[in-house]
Image (cartoon, rainbow, N blue to C red):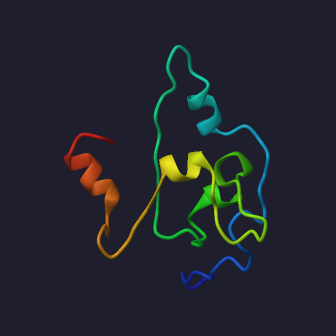
Amino acid sequence: MPDGTETKFGGTPGSLCYDRPTVATLLDAVTPSPITWRYYAPTAGSIWTAPNSIQDICQPNSAFTQCLGAEWKDNVVLESPTNPAPVLKDIQTCSL
């Protein structure tokens, strides 16, 4: 919005699922061993959580209410009350 407020995405996770090559696809394809990656996001339904809309990462359930893909589970890091800034923890432990 022009005033800086955000509006929640009106759809559900995976409902836009684009099926296109992404940086994640390229990193996974590196041989002899893939390059690891992480995507830090506030919540699964946030407008800032782009992997919601990428088929290869999200792999949504049949109702498009939850991302179930291995790429999602392994690489998308969500904030939580017990983990409010996961990127800072990863920087501190040199695992970024």
Q: Nearer the viewer, residue 46 or 57?
A: 57
Assign the C terminus to one quadrant of the image. top left
Splitting the image into 4 quarters, where does residue 71 fall?
Answer: top right
**Could you tell me how many numbered marks the image carries?**
0
The outermost residue toward the left is: 92
Residue 63, located in which quarter of the rendered image? bottom right
Query: Which residue is located at x 71 percent, y 73 percent?
Result: 12
- Asked if 36 appears above or below 15 in the picture, the reply is above
The answer to whether 84 appears left or right of 13 in the picture is left
Toward which corner of the image does residue 47 lie, by quadrant?
bottom right
Q: Nearer the viewer, residue 54 or 48?
A: 54
Quadrant of image for the N terminus: bottom right
**What residue sits 64% from the left and 61% below the top?**
67
Is 61 above or below relative to 55? below
| x, y percent for residue 41 | 48, 62
Left or right: residue 7 compared with residue 95: right
The image shows residue 4 at horizontal and vertical percentages of 54, 81
What's the residue at 56%, 16% (across, down)?
A: 31
Considering every residue shown, the one lying at the far top of the view is 32
Left or right: residue 61 compared with residue 27: right
Q: Residue at x 52, y 25 (%)?
A: 34
How far across and down, in percent of the image, does residue 90 sit? Answer: 28, 49
**Front in this rendered view, residue 23 or 69:** 69
Residue 92 appears at what percent x and percent y? 20, 48
